[in-house]
Amino acid sequence: MAGCGLLAERQERHEAKVVGDRLLAAGFRPIPADTSAKQAHLAGMPKLLFSSITKNGRRRYLLADPVRCRCLYVGDEDAYQRYSNLELQHEEAASERAARRDDRNAGAADAGPDSIGPFEGDVGPEWP
């Protein structure tokens, strides 16, 4: 059970790093939670999810990271759009990698039963 918790924590830290790196690249500014009031506010915000506020007629996008940087990322409309574009590029690249992997796997599956070479005798009589 403890191993699952450590794995989940490691995954969460990795996600926070990836998101944080993209936010910085997009122009978001990290504001550290360097007071107890800021830390309490950060803890009450949705973790690693966007929210937005409008102040003086200008929308600001917020993302709380209490896991890795213990900060609040703040960006304007342009930064949010750049971040969205980075996410789309990442998703497209991941989709292309998955399609190439599927193509390679399909080619390997088409190789037939002879593809196990010298292991064929070890498979047993149930092998077609």
Image (tube, rainbow, N blue to C red):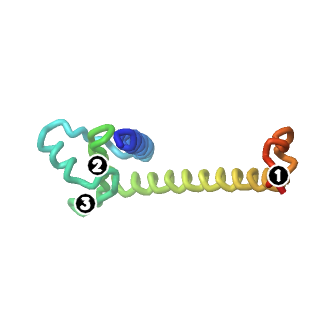
Query: Which residue does the numbered mark 3 point to in the structure image?
Result: 53
Q: Which residue is mark 1?
A: 125
- Answer left or right for 79 relative to 73: right
Q: Of callouts 2 and 3, which one flags the residue occurring earlier in the amino acid sequence?
A: 3
Q: Secondary structure at mark 3?
A: strand
As measured in the structure, the alpha-carbon distance from the residue carrying label 3 to the one carrying label 1 is 68 Å
Image quadrant in which you'd find residue 12: top left
User: Which residue is located at x 33 percent, y 38 percent?
Assistant: 68
- Residue drawn where x is 12% and y is 40% of the image: 36
Instruction: Check the image and report above or below for 41 versus 70.
Output: below
Choose between 48 and 7: the one closer to the eye.
7
Name the mark on residue 10: none
Q: Amino acid at mark 3?
A: Ile
Out of 6 and 118, give the one closest to the viewer. 118
Depth order, front residue of 38/117: 117
Quadrant that contains the N terminus? top left
Assign a secondary structure to mark 2: strand
The residue depicted at 27 percent of the width and 45 percent of the height is 72
Work out whether mark 1 precedes mark 2 in sequence or the reverse, and give the earlier one: 2
Q: Which residue is mark 2?
A: 64
Numbered disc in front, either 2 or 3: 2
Q: Is residue 78 above or below residue 6?
A: below
Name which of mark 3 and mark 1 comes first in the sequence.
3
> Type of residue at label 2?
Ala
Spatial separation of the CA atoms under disc 2 and disc 3:
13 Å
Residue 33 visible somewhere in the drawing: yes
